[in-house]
Image (spheres, rainbow, N blue to C red):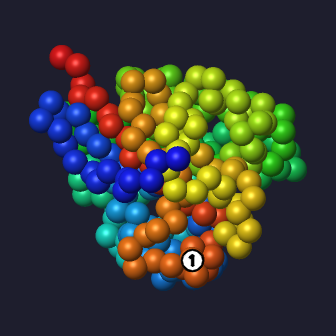
Amino acid sequence: MVSEPLPNSRTEPDGSAVVRVLGYNIRSMRDDTAALARVISACAPDLVLIQEAPRFFRWRKKLARLARAADLVILSGGGSAAGPALLCSLRATVERTEDVLLPLTPGLHRRGFATAVVRFGGARLGVLSCHLSLQSDERYDQGGMLLDRLAGMGVEHAVAGGDLNERPGGRTFRRLAEGLQDCWTVKPWGGENTSTPADPHQRIDALFATPGVEVLGCGVPLDLPGVGPDDLRAATDHLPVLAALRVPAVRP
C-alpha cells in the first residue's frame, strides 16, 4: 500500500493536471454537518462526487451551505439528479453540466447521475457521480447506463464514482472495473473499506477512471490534518474515498 502523502493539486508544464477527487455518501446531511464540512475541507478536493445529497425541502440551500463551509461551489445535481451531486473548487473551469434521471422501477427509489465536463489547465475531464440501486438486476443495468453515459460525454478522460451498494466481487462492480480503472486496485493508499465508519468491513464506495488517466493514489483518508476518527464517525454513515489523478492535456 502507498504510504507517502497523496499528491497535491497542480498543473504541470505540459498542460496536464493533478486533480484530487473525493467520493462521499453524506446521508442527506442528517448527521454532524460541521464534522462533514471539516472532513471534506481537509481532503482539499478539486471535485467532490456526492451521494445522498439533500433532495427535498430547501435542498439547494442545504447543499450550498455545505459547499460554502468546505470552500467549494455547487457544480450540478442534488434533488434534480435524485441524490447524486457534484461540488468543485474554483480551480475548475466548467464547460457543461447535466443531471440525468434513470428509468424508474416501480416500488424502488428513483436514481440518477450528476455529470459535468470541466477543465483544469490544459486537461479536460468528464465527471459522473452515482448511487446505484439496492436491487441486483436494476443495479447491473444502471452500471451499463453509467458506462454508456461516460462513452457519450465526448471526452477522452473521465472519472466516475459513488456508492455502488455492492462489493468488488459483485457483477456490477466487476462490470465497471472491466471497462474502467478501479482506482483503489490500481494504486491503493490510505484505508480500503468504506462502510461503516464505526466498523469498516466492506468496500461499497469506489472511484473509477478511464484508461489514460494516471492514478497516483486512492483510498479512505485516515490521517487528515485537523480531522480525527471522531469526525469521520460523526459526519455520515460512510467513509470518504479520495484519489489523486493525473489527467493528460488535451491533444491538439
Q: Residue at x 67, y 69 (%)?
A: 197
Instruction: Write the residue at 54% across / 69% down.
Output: 59
Which residue lies most toward the left here?
A: 13
Give x and y (percent) for residue 70: 37, 71
Instruction: Check the picture and name the quadrant holding the C terminus.
Output: top left
Above or below, 75 against 144 in this view is: below
The spot of residue 95 in percent (x, y) is: 29, 39
Q: Where residue 214 sits: x, y (%)? A: 38, 32
Q: Is residue 202 visible?
A: yes
196 displayed left or right of 209: right
Q: Nearer the viewer, residue 104 or 185?
A: 185
Count of marks placed on residues: 1
Task: Locate residue 121: give its quadrant.
Answer: top left
Amino acid type of disc 1? Answer: Pro
| x 52%, y 66%: residue | 222
Q: Extreme right residue here? A: 107
Residue behind mark 1: 229
Vertical arrangement, residue 238 with respect to residue 166, above or below: below
User: Crowding at label 1, few (<14), some or many (≥20) Cα neighbours within 10 Å?
Assistant: few
Query: Residue 247 vs residue 135: left or right?
Result: left
- Placement of 251 over or under 143, stated as above or below: above
211 or 103: which is nearer to us?
211
Q: Residue at x 23, y 34 (%)?
A: 16
* Quarter where residue 148 is shown: top right
Say if residue 76 shows up in the picture: no
x then y, percent, for residue 92: 27, 49
SS at mark 1 in the image: helix
Q: Residue furthest top?
A: 252
